[in-house]
Image (tube, rainbow, N blue to C red):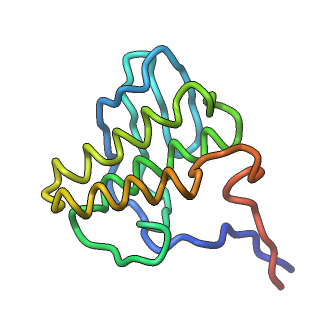
């Protein structure tokens, strides 16, 4: 018998999390999140994400931003959201969330550059969150 899992997650959401985002006019429903045309994003308890990507460390001032950014990257990589239309808006929103959470401005600017340089959410990288198997 095998198990199926998604690799790369470090954190798991314990309670639903909702936030009004600048990604409006879209309607997407998934097992773990819902995006309403108003921009309201609801991420359900149980969703797993990897925190901040790259050569850095996770701190409390990046957790909500990395959670929301990861959801949007999944949606863009899976082509459920237009990468060309939303990537810059989503990356700018990531920086704003970091600042709002108390991150030092120079660090938020550096992290924003990181997601831009890393081309986060680009569908050319293929689908995100691939299911893996193990015995």
Identity of the residue drawn at 81% across and 74% down: 133
Identity of the residue drawn at 26% across and 46% down: 97
Tell whether 42 sits left or right of 97.
Answer: right
Between 33 and 96, the residue placed more toward the observer is 96
Between 62 and 12, the residue placed more toward the observer is 62
Tell whether 97 sits left or right of 87.
Answer: left
Identity of the residue drawn at 48% across and 14% down: 25
Image position, residue 49 (x, y; %): 49, 62
Tell whether 104 sits left or right of 42.
Answer: left
Q: Is residue 80 above or below residue 69?
A: above
Question: How many marks are shown on the rendered structure?
Answer: 0
Image position, residue 116 (x, y; %): 50, 50
Image position, residue 5 (x, y; %): 69, 69
Q: State the residue lying farthest toward the right.
A: 1
Q: Is residue 25 above or below residue 78?
A: above
Identity of the residue drawn at 66% across and 31% down: 80
Image position, residue 73 (x, y; %): 56, 46
Name the quadrant containing residue 123: top right
User: Dividing the image into 4 quarters, which one contains the N terminus?
Assistant: bottom right
Q: State the residue lying farthest toward the left.
A: 102
User: Dividing the image into 4 quarters, which one contains the C terminus?
Assistant: bottom right
Between 135 and 84, the residue placed more toward the observer is 84
């Amino acid at each position: 018998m095998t198990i199926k899992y998604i690799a790369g997650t470090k954190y798991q959401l314990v309670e639903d999390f909702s936030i009004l985002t600048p990604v409006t006019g879209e309607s997407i429903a998934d097992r773990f999140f819902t995006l309403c045309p108003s921009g309201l994003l609801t991420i359900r308890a149980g969703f797993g994400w990897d925190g901040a990507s790259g050569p850095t460390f996770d701190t409390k001032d990046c957790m909500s931003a990395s959670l929301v950014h990861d959801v949007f990257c999944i949606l863009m990589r899976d082509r459920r959201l237009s990468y060309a239309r939303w990537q810059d808006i989503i990356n700018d929103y990531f920086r704003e969330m970091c600042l709002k959470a108390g991150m030092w401005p120079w660090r938020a600017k550096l992290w924003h550059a990181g997601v831009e340089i890393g081309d986060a959410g680009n569908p050319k990288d293929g689908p995100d969150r691939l299911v893996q198997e193990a015995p």
